[in-house]
Amino acid sequence: MHSRPTCRKSPILTPNYLFGFLLILLFTSHGCCKSAVYKGYRLTLAVPVEYNVGFIGRAFLMETEQIVPNFKAALSVEAVNGRYACSLEVFLGDFKVWNSGHYSRFYVSEKCVLELTENGDLNLKGPKERIGWKTGTSGQGVERLHIMRTGNLVLVDPLNRVKWQSFNFPTDVMLRGQRLNVATRLTSFPNNSTVFYSFEIQRDQIALFLHSGKWNYSYWEFKPSKNRNISFVALAVNSLEIFNDKGKKIAQIFTQRLQSLRFLALGNKTGNLGLYYYSANEENFQASFQALNATCDLPLACKPCGICTSSNACSSIGLLTKKGETNSDCGGGFPGGCGGDQVEMLELQGVISVLRNAPKMVDISKEKCANLCLYDCKCVAALYSSNEKECSVYGVVMGVKQVEKGSRLSYMVKVPRGTQRSHGKSNLKKWVLILVGVVDGLIILLVFGGLAYYFIQKRRRKLLLATNNNS
């Protein structure tokens, strides 16, 4: 059964800034007071001439008849990186659960247009009818677009057969009733960063990954017992359920609250995975389960070349060296960052990386482990375990955290040669300068003190002589 949206005489415009923003509504014979948007529908949002940081303009097309928070579909214009992005979005309350521009933004000027053509294709257009996004459903008998009670945005034909659905194009959120099959994933992109996170469904596990260029590292995994294979996962009322090829549930991750789950989300700031419910008291969504509960277990708890300390603070790599000096160069990010006499490995005790599945070598010495990274231009750090004689090499210096001493783990970072020696020299130089300063100060004090004593004694003798003469 299809949900019917509440009838609105016009879409709602909710921009942060309204200066110069116009809303142009071009409806066809079906209008907005139907349970869905029919073919021939067209909606236009005018884009501001000048760029306004933080600007968001939205026109809501429809919503489901549910207890708040309910699902809503909207056409949006948003200020992003100096330009305006046009997208079709789905919201649960005020939380965005789907976005047509998640992987590739469609930048526009002048106007942003949503159109369901007579041929059944749903398009986003800019000036001069330039198409920036489409469903590719032309000629498939599409009759209407509407939003289901699950939050799934669908295009259907007159027989209610689904021709396109947003559930088949997951972003960073998984809704209840949605299924993620093996080889699919959720992705999340931190702002102003070249890395991104993913939640992936694999045959033997579900896992969180950090991606940086060609390097992919997991930082959390969950595996079903008895090495059972996974076919798909689905979000239930109280858990994330994992199924095999026969559709039988083989494992689940339970919520820690009694309230019903509404969605699973991959955070774009932390990369953490959470199961969320709606709190009526707080009037927002709260996490009832998080994959990682410790700050230092997050892959980007600190900036690259930073260390998450036992007190959940961030320090530079050099602060944990014996000399206590900071080190601005780490990870081979400098000219001549491999081999020869130009680089060396800085060893840090009691430090590890939360990033896993890095290339490993076993039955190897620490010295050989260091050399493997030292002469590999792609390697910037290595983790060595003395117990297992195991060496892991990394292409990034991220996810580094402090652990208890005595773990017999050595984390080695590639730095310019002479860095460690320069630390000692700089300390010696500081002590020399301090010592010279103290000695100079004492000499000056003695000189001025002697002169002052001389003049005081001389004046005293004159006064004594004058007194004797007067007598």
Image (tube, grey):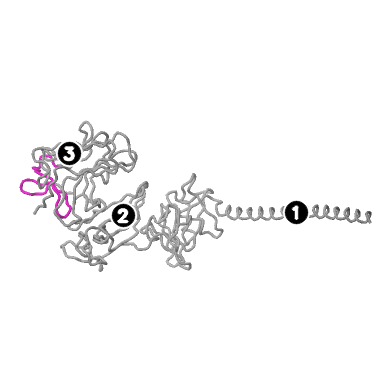
Judged left or right of residue 197, residue 344 is right
Disc with the residue nearer the chain's start (2 vs 1): 2
Q: Residues within 10 Å of mark 2 (few under 14, many from 20)?
A: some
Q: Which residue is at 19% across, 58% downward?
A: 176
Q: Which residue is at 42% across, 63% downward?
A: 390
Q: Which residue is mark 3?
A: 43
Q: Which residue is mark 2?
A: 267
Q: Is residue 275 above or below residue 448?
A: below
Q: Give the SS element for disc 3.
A: strand
Q: Which mark is residue 443?
A: 1
Relative image position of residue 39 (x, y in whole percent): 10, 40
Q: Which residues are magenta?
A: 137-163
Relative image position of residue 146 (x, y in whole percent): 13, 47
Magenta segment's dominant SS is: loop
Image quadrant assignment for residue 201: bottom left
Q: Residues within 10 Å of mark 1 (few under 14, many from 20)?
A: few
Extreme residue toward the front, this view:
471
Q: Residues within 10 Å of mark 3 (few under 14, many from 20)?
A: many
